[in-house]
């Protein structure tokens, strides 16, 4: 029971979940990371520790229950032929030596190693069939990524056809990136155009590869076919399309591994690299085989700035494939490879001011405004300071010269002050007592909270803008025309008072808006909406038909992310059913639990929240769950638990394969469970199944269950 959990612990769990979810969303979906790898790992490990002591806190949407990466829904999903793993990290020579000693012990010998540079770009999975390009996908969650094949055709170093004698099937792993010279040129052009510059080469590569070039081409085609389209608009669309293709053509690829392969027998990593070269694929010229790992690490630490692209370390791999198979993998990373992360570059700059921002949940976050300075490949002038206690801990004053680094060569982070350069003019930062956006007194929601929040969720402009932006995000209603600038315009120009009236917007609502209407002469107001206005209105109509789980996510109920929302939508027939459910009913659902149930009940008890629901319903937003079409009903009444990675399925895909046949997928194993489906790298649920004597199915058994039902699955296991 949650009553057994200390208030301070419960409060800290809530805070950690918010921090980690926000960090993941900004890193994986928006390519705008805000906390360092070290801080992320610290928070994640603390959350693991809390949940190990209080298992009742776990939910399906807890960050500990999912892989960090996520596939955005702007692109079609692609299931990788073999899983793309992450890498474990070491940060100094002693940690590397410990890893090398463990390899020697596990293998009973010292293997040959291959060393290569760790390019700081975007990981991709490329499949060739009979020598021809079949698909290009981002890493995603390691099992399912985003289909970016269309965009990849514009990248010169990704060949459409392989040379030499390629295998009939070849799955290649690589990194897409910008060379530093190209990155500087791109940012220079953005600056000249008064557009937002990329924070670093990795973000630039991710953002560029995720452009919807196909949609731009469609917009050009529609404008050409529409006799009412002006030449100016058509020219603008063509320029935007040309710019998108031009920047894609500046991307580069380096391959560094092989996944699935048919038609070739390979004995080692180095042998596979020779095959990739023979096929015309770009392999780094900097890899070495049979070297001393310590010397390799030391050399490239001294020469890391001598290469044409960003690196954040080196990777050491056991070269022999048979030895790799012997060592195996953990749930997230191979045991036969390690990444040595170099310490970030440190520079000094002037701390001009410390300001605060207001987030979607009202969290007040101090951030540093500094003299622009180049560090790790890009110019930086802002850095988060997280909370007032962090400012005190770092001992920094406004006016200080400060040490700055990019943690993980990505996140700008102030380390501390250069105290010897103080001249007495420096000032202490004083945390404001009122919200900078709405002037409401800020406070700690719970006594144990280090974060301060603005409690004026109903009408604080900053929170409203962030919530609108979240509603339009890919994980909520995926409204393409509702970005950060559009959200700000809707609130700042007084078009909306809050999100309740979002779906009542019309052309008349937007007339007079500087952001949503066509430019006219100074002093006049336009009476025609522009492309931004047209796009927003058309996308809002589409959003009205989104599935119930997306509506739940869009409401910004604390702890209700996509996974919990989908669970609720499957359990209840409509939003009204969820509203009417008791806290006990909600808490009894697998993957929900008492804390989330309490949060849901509390949200719907607030009058202005009820007003949002009523107005959305009145505007025609669908608040009912559309019953999924069953492929068959031969799993009706059957309850299964799935653990580990199933070949050919994402986590949601495996669940859907069961539910689309009438079955139920549970998150925990009990005596009532009919089958436990076990894939690669299963967790403790496999052990629990064996303990309770629950039938266990592998991938082949799962296929039998889906195809022929429970009786056939039991026969497959030799059971009556």
Image (cartoon, rainbow, N blue to C red):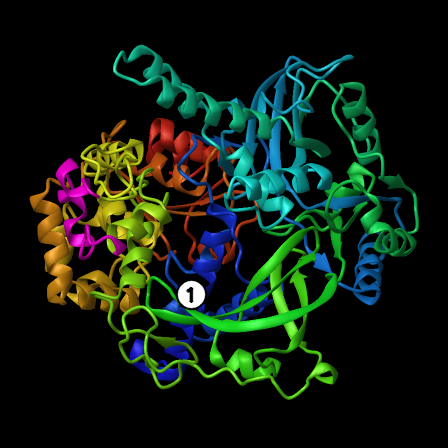
| Location of residue 570 (image quadrant) | top left
Which residue is located at x 46 percent, y 46 percent? 29
Check disc 1 and report its element: helix, strand or loop.
Answer: helix
| Location of residue 356 (image quadrant) | bottom left
Left or right, 289 with respect to 623, comes to right
Residue 624 in sight here: no
Left or right, 371 with respect to 668, comes to right
Residue 206 in sight here: yes
**Height in image: 388 above or below 169?**
below
Q: Quadrant of the C terminus?
A: top left
Which residue is located at x 72 percent, y 42 percent? 180
Q: Which residues are magenta?
A: 492-512
Q: Quick one: 50 or 340, which is closer to the camera?
A: 340
Q: Position of residue 403 (x, y in %)?
A: 69, 71
**Height in image: 623 above or below 560?**
above
Q: Which residue is mark 1?
A: 17
Q: Position of residue 577 (x, y in %)?
A: 12, 53
Left or right, 501 with respect to 268, comes to left
Q: Is residue 494 magenta?
A: yes
Q: Quick one: 513 or 222, which is closer to the camera?
A: 513
């Amino acid at each position: 029971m949650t009553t057994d959990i200390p208030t301070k612990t419960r409060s800290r769990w809530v805070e950690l979940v918010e921090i980690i979810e926000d960090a993941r969303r900004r890193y994986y979906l928006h390519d705008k990371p805000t906390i360092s790898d070290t801080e992320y790992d610290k928070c994640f490990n603390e959350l693991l520790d809390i949940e190990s002591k209080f298992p009742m806190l776990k939910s399906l949407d807890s960050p500990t229950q999912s892989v960090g990466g996520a596939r955005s829904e702007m692109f079609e999903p692609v299931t990788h032929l073999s899983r793309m793993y992450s890498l474990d990290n070491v940060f100094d020579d002693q940690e590397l030596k410990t890893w090398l000693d463990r390899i020697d012990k596990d293998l009973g010998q010292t293997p040959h190693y291959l060393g290569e540079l760790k390019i700081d770009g975007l990981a991709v999975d490329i499949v060739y069939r009979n020598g021809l390009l079949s698909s290009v996908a981002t890493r995603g969650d390691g099992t399912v990524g985003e289909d970016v094949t269309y965009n990849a055709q514009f990248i010169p170093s990704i060949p459409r056809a392989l040379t030499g004698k390629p295998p009939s099937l070849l799955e290649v792993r690589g990194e897409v990136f910008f060379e530093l010279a190209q990155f500087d040129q791109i940012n220079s052009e953005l600056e000249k155009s008064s557009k937002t510059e990329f924070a670093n080469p990795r973000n630039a590569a991710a953002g560029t590869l995720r452009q919807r070039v196909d949609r731009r081409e469609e917009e050009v085609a529609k404008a050409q076919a529409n006799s009412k389209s002006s030449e100016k608009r058509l020219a603008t669309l063509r320029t935007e399309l040309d710019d998108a293709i031009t920047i894609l053509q500046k991307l580069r690829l380096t391959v560094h591994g092989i996944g699935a392969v048919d038609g070739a027998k390979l004995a080692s990593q180095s042998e596979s690299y020779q095959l990739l070269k023979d096929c015309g694929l770009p392999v780094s010229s900097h890899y070495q085989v049979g070297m001393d790992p310590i010397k390799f690490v030391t050399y490239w630490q001294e020469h890391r700035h001598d290469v044409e692209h960003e690196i954040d370390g080196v990777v050491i791999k056991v070269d022999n494939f048979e030895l790799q198979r012997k060592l195996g993998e953990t749930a997230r990373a191979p045991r036969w490879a390690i990444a040595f992360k170099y310490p970030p570059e440190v520079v000094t700059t002037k701390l001009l001011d410390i300001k605060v921002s207001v987030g979607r949940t009202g969290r007040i976050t101090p951030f540093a405004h500094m003299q622009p300075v180049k560090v790790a490949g890009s110019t930086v002038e802002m850095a988060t300071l997280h909370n007032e206690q962090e400012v005190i801990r770092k001992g920094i004053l406004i006016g200080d010269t400060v040490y700055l680094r990019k943690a993980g060569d990505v996140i700008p982070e102030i380390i501390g002050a250069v105290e010897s350069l103080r001249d007495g003019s420096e000032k202490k930062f004083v945390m404001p007592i009122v919200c900078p956006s709405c002037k409401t007194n800020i406070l700690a929601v719970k006594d144990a909270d280090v974060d301060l929040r603005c409690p004026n969720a109903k009408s604080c402009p900053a929170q409203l803008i962030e919530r609108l932006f979240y509603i339009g995000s890919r994980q909520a209603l995926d409204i393409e025309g509702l970005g950060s600038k559009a959200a700000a315009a809707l609130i700042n120009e007084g078009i909306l008072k809050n999100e309740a009236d979002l779906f009542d917007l019309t052309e008349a609502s937007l007339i007079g808006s500087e952001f949503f209407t066509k430019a006219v002469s100074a002093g006049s107001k336009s009476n025609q909406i522009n492309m931004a206005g047209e796009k927003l209105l058309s996308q809002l109509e589409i959003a009205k038909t989104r599935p119930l789980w997306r509506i739940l996510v869009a409401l910004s109920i604390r702890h209700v992310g996509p996974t919990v929302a989908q669970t609720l939508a499957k359990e209840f027939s409509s939003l009204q059913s969820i509203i009417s459910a008791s806290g006990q009913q909600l808490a009894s659902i697998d993957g929900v639990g008492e804390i989330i149930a309490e949060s849901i009940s509390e949200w719907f008890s607030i009058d202005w929240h009820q007003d949002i629901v009523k107005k959305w319903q009145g505007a025609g937003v669908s608040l009912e769950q559309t019953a999924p079409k069953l492929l068959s009903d031969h799993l009706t009444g059957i309850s299964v638990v799935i653990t580990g990675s199933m070949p050919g399925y994402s986590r949601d895909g495996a669940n859907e394969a069961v539910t689309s046949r009438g079955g139920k997928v549970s998150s925990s194993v009990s005596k009532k469970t009919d089958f436990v489906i076990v894939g690669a790298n299963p967790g403790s649920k496999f052990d629990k199944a064996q303990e309770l004597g629950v039938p266990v199915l592998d991938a082949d058994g799962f296929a039998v269950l889906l195809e022929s039902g429970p009786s056939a699955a039991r026969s497959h296991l030799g059971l009556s």
